[in-house]
Amino acid sequence: MRNITTISRERFNVYVDWTRSAHIRDAIVELEWYADIRERVLGVVAMDLTDSDYSFVVLGRDEVGRFRAIDLKVSLPHAGTARSQLKRTMARYSETGKEVFPQFDAQGEAFDILTPIVDRHRLHPSFLVLSENKFWAGARAVVSEMMRHFVDVDGNFVEQFQTTGFDARLWELYLFAYLKEAGFHFERDMHAPDFVIGRHGQKVAVEAVTVNPSDTEVLRQREQPDWRPRDQADIEQRLLAYMPLKFGSTLHSKLSKKPSYWELEHVKGLPLIFALADFHEPQSMTWSHPAVLEYLYGITQTANHSDDGRLIVDTKSVGPYVKDNGTEIPAGFFNQPNAEHVSGILFSSTGTLSKFNRIGRIAGFGNAASRMLRMGACHHHDPNSSKPLLFQFEVKPGEVTETWAEGLSLFHNPNAAIPVPDDMFPNIAHHRLQDGQFRSFIPEFHPYMSMTFHFSARDD
């Protein structure tokens, strides 16, 4: 059984995260992961959380290319017994030489999202990077496996992903990945909102929302394709009104949509979440996130320290934002008419193409002729700290790991007609405004922003 070897959990997950049933993580703990030499057959050893005995599952690709269970055995007394039987069973399937193990009930189709279906001049620059650049092999592997399971409700996902809708569609894929990782089950037979999902007997509706460049910004980016990072003074100026107005315009358009999301029959009675990401210019998500909290709650905070080093936070209400034409736009999205129907805002500044590439590289799908460095700012858990921690590390298989949940936040609406249950979205940051002060639960490692750099490796 030399052709059966261990693989990392991260590599197994790239293949199988999309297959696991919604409740499997509550029933078992996966212990070991295996593959044959060509990775046509996968296997996992697990422990039952109820009986504390062991089981194994063998997986192969079905007619659509999805890894699904083709053999299993439960109620084994020891992990070693499960391991040895798994290897023998996997070897038997591997020796058949089969690439496909039909299950005769496969539905849907696998989307070849990386092969262009439009003329090259219409392809989005980021799509060209993903589909052609040798250093983005990790992201290609993740996206390819994911799209064997993704349901294209509107029928235009591939074309939009390749052209003008790349950022919005990538954000949908990121949300799909997190929701799968978190153990949600999906109801994807309706056109809006993007996701109706369930977990532990509770359901929630999620609509993906992206901040996109205006027509003027699109023209400027075309005329000045060589991107330059903004300096700190420019960033601080844009955070005063420009970015709150960008977020406000995007969210207000969703709030004003007719028919309203909360009026749809399949959404009535459910918490409604808008999942927000900023793609209005290159790297804007690395600096625009402070404007989210300010706009949503209509307050701003400044930090000072007492003589003995204790953190003192001063919270003030934000006045209306003034547009260039003099129009005043009120702050505080959650205080706007009809906003009580929105239970919260999911937000991440790290749900980008680089995250797909890092996860793929950690799983061993990256290009061996390159190195990848990630640096950014994360939450500092010192209660008297007013600034985030800076971090920097090389993204290496076996040395670091990353989840889809990492960097994701849920801002709860204090005025929500249907609040989000506390345990609905696991492993992410949660923020609530209570008695005029923020109360937040922050995971141990929670990046607020990061940038990922590629270096071509040479022998010398």
Image: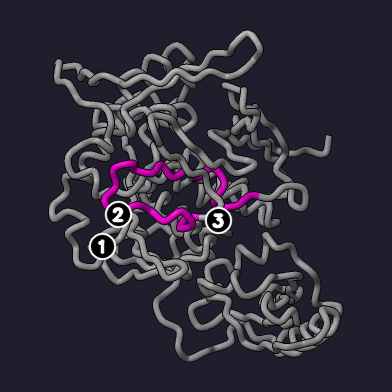
Q: Can residue 123 be seen in the rendering of this structure? A: no
Q: Can residue 458 be found in the magenta stretch?
A: no
Q: Where is mark 2, residue-wise?
A: 418
The front one of 369 and 282 is 282
In the picture, the disc for residue 269 is 1
Q: Contact (CB < 8 A) between labels 2 and 1? A: yes
Q: Quadrant of the N terminus?
A: bottom right
| Res. 364 in view | yes
Left or right, residue 272 beside residue 328: right
Tag 3 residue: 140
Mark 1 crowd level (few <14, some 14–19, many ≥20, 10 Å Cα): some
Q: Earlier in the sequence, mark 2 or mark 3?
A: 3
Residue 177 image point, x, y percent: 50, 58
Q: CA distance from mark 3 to mark 1?
A: 38 Å
Task: Give the image quarter of residue 102.
Answer: bottom right
* Residue nearest the observer in this picture, 353 or 440: 440
Label 3 crowd (10 A; few <14 / some 14-19 / many >=20): many
Residue type at mark 2 is Ile
Which one is earlier in the sequence, the residue at label 2 or at label 1? Answer: 1
